[in-house]
Image (cartoon, rainbow, N blue to C red):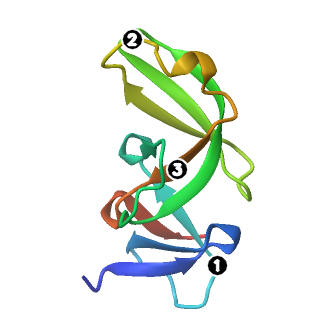
Amino acid sequence: GSDIAEVRAGALGLLKAKLGEPAPVSGNDVAVAVRPEKLKLHWQHPNGAANVLAGRVGAVAYFGDRSHYYVEVDGIAKPFAVSVQNAAGPGRDADAAQKPVWLSFEPEAALVLKD
């Protein structure tokens, strides 16, 4: 809809996100906030997904029913923390470090805010 904006995010490319209130002025610097639980982790490129970021697994913390993957993305200082439900135990965790992954999120899960 018209409340979805396109944001040029440097090395991350073009992102789509909802406009916050008050809406920033076109051409000004903005921040894009994404709710962490809305980030999806993919082991292969998610064709057709919105807002795809390429990265690599930095560290993994195993918590029994879920794992937290800390994903490093070029151009972003801090890693993204992504929580993933564990269906079959810690299978992927042991050798996940430095593996390529992709993150995606829906435009409605992100908010464009005045910087």
Residue 29: numbered disc: 1
Amino acid type at circle 2 is Gly
Amino acid type at circle 3 is Trp
Residue at 41 percent of width and 56 percent of height:
46
Q: Is residue 73 visible?
A: yes
CA–CA distance between discs 1 and 2? Answer: 43 Å
Q: Please, what secondary structure does the residue beneath circle 3 have? A: strand
Residue 89: numbered disc: 2
Which of the two discs, 1 and 3, sits closer to the camera? 3
Residue at 47 percent of width and 48 percent of height:
44
Q: Please, what secondary structure does the residue beneath circle 2 have? A: loop
Q: Earlier in the sequence, mark 1 or mark 2?
A: 1
Q: Position of residue 59 (x, y in %)?
A: 65, 26
Residue 102: numbered disc: 3
- Above or below — where is 91 with respect to 113? above
Of the 4 image quadrants, the one containing the N terminus is bottom left
Q: Position of residue 60 (x, y in %)?
A: 59, 23
